[in-house]
Amino acid sequence: MTEIALTQDSPAAATVPAPRHLPDAQTVTAVTHWTDALFSFRVSRPQSLRFRSGEFVMIGLMGDNGKPLLRAYSIASPAWDDELEFYSIKVPDGPLTSKLQHIKVGDEIILRPKPVGTLVHDALLPGKRVWFLATGTGIAPFASLMRDPETYEKYDQVIMMHTCRTAAELTYGAELIEGLKTDELIGEMVEGKLLYYPTTTREPSGHMGRITDNLSSGKVFADLGIDPITAEGDRAMVCGSLAFNKDVMAVLESFGLREGANSEPREYVVEKAFVGEGV
């Protein structure tokens, strides 16, 4: 097909409609496809948007019915970043992600600038060590928190446990964590403080097994050469499927930790806002 450039003097120019913009629109600045089922993207950040690392916002596209189709997505970039990053699964028949996975640089998405969430430092009592526990795209809020200087100012040690089915599904988190070592802002803060414990459940790898099993058996403590969890010094944040969250909560409570919230800080918090893989 030959493209025809229309000028103001061209008779057809008057019939060209003005570009349509989405409500609360932000522009896509980068897209990375990590696997056939996982991708991340960055968008412009509204100048007025203020958020705490670990919070989420509602983002989406227009649905086939002409109404906004929105889902909760954790902001994967830290609070200081000039742009916003998101990490998503691709669901072939998902109402939103079946469309969202095809976005390109320059496209627009809808972003409702009202951040909320439980996975924030204010929801935890002071402690010496913090555990970030995630499966799949549940690593997104921790991608934000691991890049925030406040995390390393508050804790002597930060442990990121991330479990996926295959090694390829761990790539997003692994590359992010590797990059922190040379990060100009927090590279020195991260050194010696951040421990990374990735595991797989369906493919052989250096570490295998579910997070709950590795915690309950004490394997993760032995592998990392650290003391077991105690209510006095340890804090935890949890993000995954509903079943995963329930199982991890039971394990954390077996160590004496109590669930907290923004209004009542305690030893651990869980993000319960996400709808799972039917997105």
Image (cartoon, rainbow, N blue to C red):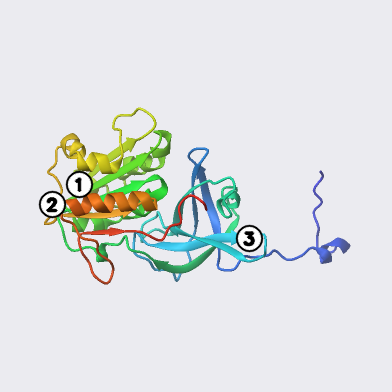
Give the residue at mark 1: 193
Badge 3 marks a residue whose secondary structure is loop
Of residues 273 and 251, which is closer to you in this image?
A: 251
Task: Give 233 or 243, whichever is nearer the viewer.
Answer: 243
Tell whether label 2 touches label 1 (CB within 8 Å).
no
Q: Name which residue lies at 14% across and 56% down.
A: 231
Distance between mark 1 and mark 3 Cα atoms: 44 Å
Three-letter amino acid code at disc 2? Thr
The x and y percentages for residue 37 are: 51, 41
Callouts 1 and 3 close, C-beta under 8 Å: no
Give the farthest residue toward the top: 204
* Residue 9 picture location, percent across and down: 85, 64
**Amino acid on which disc 1 is placed:** Lys
**Crowding near the residue tagged with mark 2, few <14, some 14–19, many ≥20 C-alpha atoms within 10 Å:** some
Residue at horizontal 59%, vertical 68%?
Answer: 23
In this rendering, which labeled residue sits more in front, label 1 or label 2?
Answer: 2
Q: Going by the image, does 86 lie left or right of 263?
A: right
User: Is label 2 in a helix, a strand or a loop?
Assistant: loop
In percent of width and height, residue 156 lies at 16, 52
- List the residue tagged with mark 3: 63
Locate residue 63 relative to residue 78 in the image: left or right: right
| Residue underneath mark 2 | 230
Q: Residues within 10 Å of mark 1 (few under 14, many from 20)?
A: some
Question: On the rendered image, what quadrant is the N terminus found in?
Answer: top right
Q: Is residue 190 above or below residue 219?
A: below
